[in-house]
Structure formats: structure tokens, C-alpha cells
Image (cartoon, rainbow, N blue to C red):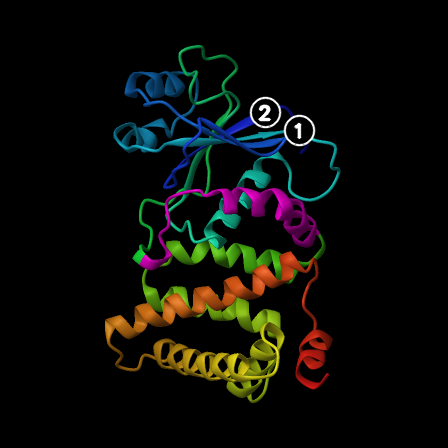
Amino acid sequence: MIIKGNWFILGNGIYFEKDEVEILPYLKLRKVNKLSVFELAGLGVKGFNQWSLIEPFCYLKNNFEIVSSENENTFGYDILNRAWLLNTLLVLRKKTMINSIASLNQSWNNLKELHDVQANLCDYHINIIKINSLNQHNIEDADINWLKEYFEIANILAYNHEKFRYSLEVLNSWRYCIDLKSAIAIIWAAIESIVDVSSEITYRISLSISSLLYSRGKKRIDKFKEIKKLYSLRSKVVHGSNIKDIDIENALIGSFDLLSELVNYMIENNKMLTEQDFESAIFE
């Protein structure tokens, strides 16, 4: 099904100063004024049966909407999934409390004038893992400039490469796991999918990633040791060893950062990593 027109995805969990921020001509962030319970109920009358799930956001600050419009691209993410991609890239930028709640075919700032309502819940979860050091609320100029430069590159990589799509899905979905251990497990599943090794995993993953991200020298050695330690923690967590809560949280932070580094590398170099890339990084 081809989705046309303009769609407005209600969200929460980030802050930006201007009323509207343009990422691309067909993709914007816009502040949403205080939502009214009565106006939301009006959506229910018009057929949006899940309207009551949105009621808690009437009492929260910093609501916003992603405005996604048609453009000339004939491939990649469509109008609604493009909003999901923007949400996920903001998670990549450590805005991990961002939450896309529901989509609507008109602005959430204009619920008084309802017409031909089409609305659905998005990837909305009541519970979300909160890690303070990964919880940056403010959208800075650096974030906006990065998104403007790399959004379409991420879109095309996702269209062409299943492994890249999977890494994006994990970047977004680990936050909705039932506990930190489960989150660590799926993050490392994505990392292992990118590196694609099946034997001597700890050594080869550590060597491959550290060689890719850093030139020969102390920084590469330190990164190698850091990844080995992370993978050891990952193994203990996944296999149910007795580990302190603070160590589990640190393992999650380090694992998220590592996956983020790999995804950033692919986006900023406009390429899906292959075995040849890791071999070249190690031996050349």
C-alpha cells in the first residue's frame, strides 16, 4: 500500500528550542501545544479506539510531532516509516527516551477541526528502560546538522541491506526489553551480525572492531581491551552469572555505545560493513 499526503507522528522525550525544526523539506520536528482530553476523546468518536492510551501525554511537557510528507523518492522508507527512522537516528544520538506514540493524518495541534480521521498507535510502549548517561533530551545544532547530512544515506542503506535494517531495529527496540540482561543480549546479536564471526568470537570481534574504528597504536589497543571486557561481561550476563547491578548497567551502556559506533561508521562512510572491510582494517 502506498501512503500519500502528510502524516503527523505524536512523540515525547526530547526538547528543541524552536517551534519547528526542518530536517529535510519533507521531514520536520514541530512542537505540540498541550493536548486536551476532550479533543482526544473526539478522535475516539471518529474511530481512533486507542485514544485513551494517549491521555497520559496530556499532562507531560515537550510533546512534539514528526511531520512526514511525500517526496520524490521511489524507494526506501515510506512516509510513516521515515518517521520511525528519524526516531531511531535520534536514539543513535543518545536521545533514548524519545517515544513515537501515534500517527494521525492531520496535525496534533489542530484536533478541534477533525476531518476524515486516520489514526493508529505507533511503536509505543508504556515501559522503557531509562539509563541516565544515555538520556540526552536536548536536540542540539550538531544533531540537526548530522541528521540533515546523513538521514537519506541511512534511508538508502536500510533499503539495500537487511543487516543494517536489523541494527537499526535493535538500536530502537532494546529500550523496550523486560530487563537490562535482555537488552544486552539483543544489542550483541546485532553487533555479531555485523561482524559475522563464528569461532574465537571474543578475540575476533575485539580485533575486528578495534582495527576498523582506530588506527594502529594505543587507542586501538585500548579499544581492543575494552571490547574484550565488554564481551566477557555480555557472556556472564547472558549465561546468568551473578553480576552486580551496576556492572550490568555499565555493560549495557558500553554495548549500546559499541553498536552505535558501528552504525555511525556505516552511515558516515555510506557503506555496509563486510568481512573484507574488517580484514583490510586488520592487515593493511
- CA–CA distance between discs 1 and 2? 7 Å
Q: Is residue 141 part of the magenta span, yes or no?
A: yes
Q: Which residues are magenta?
A: 133-159
Q: Nearer the viewer, residue 15 or 234?
A: 15
Describe the element under mark 2 as helix, strand or loop: strand
Q: Nearer the viewer, residue 182 or 230?
A: 230
Amino acid type at circle 1 is: Glu
Q: Which mark is residue 70?
A: 1
Residue that carries the numbered disc 2 in the rendered image: 6
Amino acid type at circle 2 is: Asn
Q: In terms of sequence position, does the residue under pointer 1 or pointer 2 come before the other?
A: 2
Q: Quadrant of the N terminus?
A: top right
Residue 4 coordinates in the image, percent (x, y): 65, 26
The reply to whether callout 1 and callout 2 are in contact (CB within 8 Å) is yes
The residue under the point 37% across, 30% down is: 50
- Residue 107 seen in this snapshot: yes
Classify 10 Å Cα crowding around label 2: few (below 14), some (14-19), many (20 and above). some
